[in-house]
Amino acid sequence: MPEEDSAGLMLDKIKEDISLASRHIEVLITVASHQPIGIIKLSELLKLPQHRIRYSLRILETSGYIQASSAGAVSTSKAEELFLHLNDDIDEIIKILQMIKEKDFTQT
């Protein structure tokens, strides 16, 4: 595979990962603000298919950010901790990307 294709695939994977993380965070924020909440209501609020909501909930539960209850998903103290640092963590990611963007690639 040519190097250009490999680099393009790498960046596509990064974009896909960021998009997926964004969805998981959006689901987590919605759970925290509407808890307890089920898949159908989350799907309606976020205008996402139920299978995507189900996947995000599974990832969030496995990671310890939510837990299932008889009335629906609820957030955990681990989610509260994530929310405390979320903006700082996102700012750090933006700084890293900005440093990459500012590099002069014309000399390579």
Image: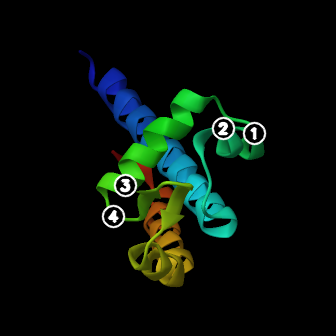
Decide which of tag 3 and tag 2 comes sooner along the chain. 2
**Residue 60, position in %: x, y?**
41, 54
Query: Hey, what amino acid is under mark 1?
Result: Glu
**Residue 89, position in %: x, y?**
46, 74
For the residue pair 11 and 78, the one nearer the viewer reads as 78
Residue at the disc numbered 3:
61
Crowd rating for badge 1 (residues with CA inside 10 Å; few <14, some 14–19, many 20+): few
Which mark's residue is nearer the viewer, 3 or 2?
2
Confirm or deny contact between disc 1 and disc 2 (CB under 8 A): yes
Residue at the disc numbered 2:
40
Decide which of tag 3 and tag 1 comes sooner along the chain. 1
Query: Hey, what amino acid is under mark 3?
Result: Glu
**Residue 95, position in %: x, y?**
49, 71
Q: Which mark is residue 44?
A: 1
What is the C-alpha distance between the residues marked 3 and 1? 20 Å
What is the C-alpha distance between the residues marked 3 and 2? 17 Å
